[in-house]
Image (spheres, grey):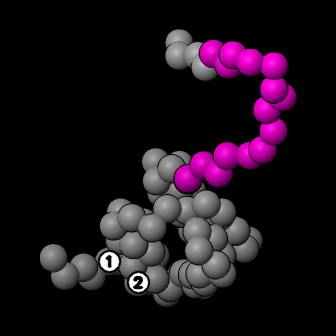
Amino acid sequence: MEKIVIRGGNRLEGSVQTSGAKNAALPLMYASILTGEEIDLHRVPCLKDILTAKQLLLQLGVQLDDLSAGTLKIKARQIIDHRLHMKW
């Protein structure tokens, strides 16, 4: 296990912004089609895998709104098609 050793008599304060993980975001994006509820995902990284997942979900009829950088609102109330038509 790694550790951080801090020397000195000064108190530490502040915060660290961590990025989101695609391996956590992708399964949640795909699981959104199992519910009709609106889902908000925060700290979603902007990676090619995430963009591909968004395109797949859009083809199925899922509504995706980019609310701000790293935040997605997903609404899968009306799945219009169960087949994907990807152009590779």
Residue 26, visible in the rendered structure: yes
Give the x, y percent position of residue 23. Answer: 46, 48
Give the x, y percent position of residue 35. Answer: 67, 66
The question of residue 68 being in magenta is answered with no
Residue 59: image tag: 2
The question of residue 9 being in magenta is answered with yes
Q: Is residue 55 left or right of residue 18?
A: left
Q: Is residue 51 left or right of residue 2?
A: left
- Residue furthest left as drawn: 88
Vertical arrangement, residue 15 with respect to residue 57, above or below: above
**Which of the two residues, 77 or 20, is positioned nearer the viewer here?**
20
Q: Residues within 10 Å of mark 1 (few under 14, many from 20)?
A: few
Residue to which mark 1 is pinned: 84
Vertical arrangement, residue 11 with respect to residue 36, above or below: above
Magenta part of the protein: which range?
5-20
- How many marks can you see? 2
Disc 1 residue type?
Leu
Per the picture, the main secondary structure of the magenta-coloured stretch is loop
Q: Residues within 10 Å of mark 2 (few under 14, many from 20)?
A: some
Q: Which residue is located at x 27 percent, y 82 percent?
A: 85
Q: In the picture, which quadrant includes the C terminus?
A: bottom left
User: Do the CB atoms of the residues marked 1 and 2 lie less than 8 Å apart?
Assistant: yes
Q: Secondary structure at mark 2?
A: helix
**Which of the two residues, 73 or 17, is positioned nearer the viewer here?**
17
Give the x, y percent position of residue 26. Answer: 48, 57
Q: Which residue is located at x 63 percent, y 15 percent?
A: 5
Marks 1 and 2, the one that precedes in the sequence: 2
**Which of the two residues, 40 or 68, is positioned nearer the viewer here?**
68
Q: Secondary structure at mark 1?
A: loop
Q: Which residue is located at x 61 percent, y 60 percent?
A: 43
